[in-house]
Amino acid sequence: MNTLEERVLSIIEKNSRVDTKELAILLGTEESEILAAMEKLEQEDVICGYHTMIDWDKTGVDKVTALIEVRVTPQRGKGFDEIAERIYKYPEVTSVYLISGGYDLMVTLEGKSLKDVSSFVTNKLSTLDTVIATTTHFILKKYKDHGTIMTRHHEDQREMITP
Amino acid sequence: MNENANHVLSDTCVGLKPSGIRKFFDIVSEMTDAISLGVGEPDFDTPWHIRDEGIYSLEKGRTFYTSNSGLKELKKEVAAYMKRSQNLRYDYNSQIFITVGGSEAIDLMFRAMINPGDQVLIPTPCYVSYDPCARLAGAEPVIVELKEENEFRLKAEDLEKKITDKSKILVLPFPNNPTGSIMTREDLRPIAELCIKHDLYVLSDEIYGELTYEGRHVSIASFPGMQERTIVVNGFSKAYAMTGWRLGYACGPDWIISQMIKIHQFAIMCAPTTSQYAAVEALRNGDEDVRMMRESYNERRRFVLYSLKKMGLPCFEPKGAFYAFPCIKEFGMTSDEFATRLLQEEKVAIVPGTAFGDCGEGFLRLSYAYSIDNLKKALARLERFVTRLRAK
Ligand SMILES: Cc1ncc(COP(=O)(O)O)c(C=O)c1O
């Protein structure tokens, strides 16, 4: 990875709306260089998508997020990959991580209501053959997500003019 | 006001010109909805691990005075920093001490060295405190004009013309506030030669040294024969976004430093203890933060230069600090008029160049210590303003 690619990634990770012309200005290069870098990064699946951070709590829309710890029996020859795939294919699952420690997979899930989420866990997740146990934690409040503090409106506290 | 005020007060103090910044500040503070590009301090919060060390020191009850010259650990870290950044060796015990911002160090160097009638050479436009501090110490400030055609770098010819047998101290304010100009090794060499030839001492204000966007900052103290005649002033305000902590330092020959500490011990006692603990963490583990902020300023710098070019405002490429210094002479107004009208008509606050000396006339100091979004908004308004002026 060259430094231009790294700078592009670190800028668009924070703000995916900067256009390529602006990126070229910020990084002191030509737009064609930026376009080439981004195309390469997309093709290599380094850039996997362009998303928007939304604090749904501030809207009237009902949404519940849960973190589910899942313990599974790894399968011979396939390890955890197959069971992870079974789980991540559900559209309501927003992330699946294999992790070290007391359990195996960390699954995050979004549903409309608590009932929605619990019914997913009991009817779909727990019934998978290799799943041994699950523990569900409901998220009560998001303070910070993807490096963004959700609860604070950033206000410039400096004086208007200083030497 | 007391009618005898002028008999009672110090003539030197009463005679000081009020700061041009202050005047503009008073106009701006009436206008709460203005967008400002007028700030001379970082927009970043102090990195959390540094704040955390400050908080931790309070929790531990480290709420006492430190030694006059500062915490030993901190002086050692400053010495290590001078070694790794400039390859300069300073004895932490006798050649370094910790001050209340770079500001205090500037004041103290003058007070420790000036005798009545001594002259202090001040390249201008520059930061607002050298001239008044020199006067308060009894010196006669001598302006050396920095010129746009030289990208506001100090030229040996211009300096030499102003040197007299009364010249004692040269202020070297680079990277420069308000112009953003820097001095490279090649630019500094003839200046160093002049200092040695004319036995000048240097106050090298390197507070923006870490914010250099092409190459690395070079200290004049790193030239042969210069360390023994230079006080390097630096601090935590700009590089680590720590303006409110009020912490800086001075490095130089022990016989000058010890006199500066003498005044410091009577006037200040010691720099804020909490800030000193936080600063140890800054110097130990803050390099990555500095790099990140520098990169971010650099992006904004490019954006500002691009925008100024697009609206046709001439501006040399500033390579340090976080200011651009565009020229507005084409409009036939003073900087003051331009800035005031810009504020009234477009609600954008940019400081007139004259706040940094008379030779800032015809320029504005545009700070880019702001988010890109903020810069975009303000620069769009500036563009609308200059377009309207040109249409008339
Ligand atoms: C060139 C220059 N020197 C020194 C200072 C003083 O900084 P501090 O006292 O916060 O270290 C400033 C602050 O704006 C500055 O711009």
Image (spheres, coloured by chain):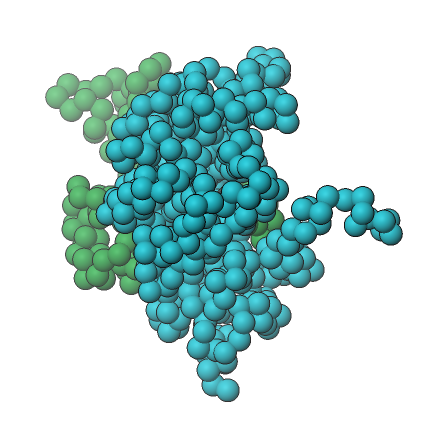
Chain colours: A green, B cyan
- Name the residue located 41 percent from the left edge and 50 percent from the top edge: B163
Furthest-bottom residue in view? B392
Residue at image point 52% right, 58% down: B357
Q: Farthest residue in the right direction?
A: B3
Q: How many labels does the image show?
A: 0
* Residue at 68% in and 52% down: B15
Residue A2's x, y, as percent? Answer: 17, 44
Looking at the image, residue B190 lies above or below residue B45:
below
Left/right of residue B216 with respect to residue B337 in the rendered view: left
Q: Horizontal and vertical percent for residue B352?
A: 53, 63
Q: Which of B182 and B194 is in front in this view?
A: B194
Residue B91, compared with residue B359, is above or below; it is above
Q: Residue furthest left?
A: A77
Q: Where is residue B360 in the image (x, y as percent from the top left)?
A: 48, 62
Q: In this view, does B4 lie to the left or right of B384?
A: right
Q: Is residue B347 left or right of residue B232?
A: right
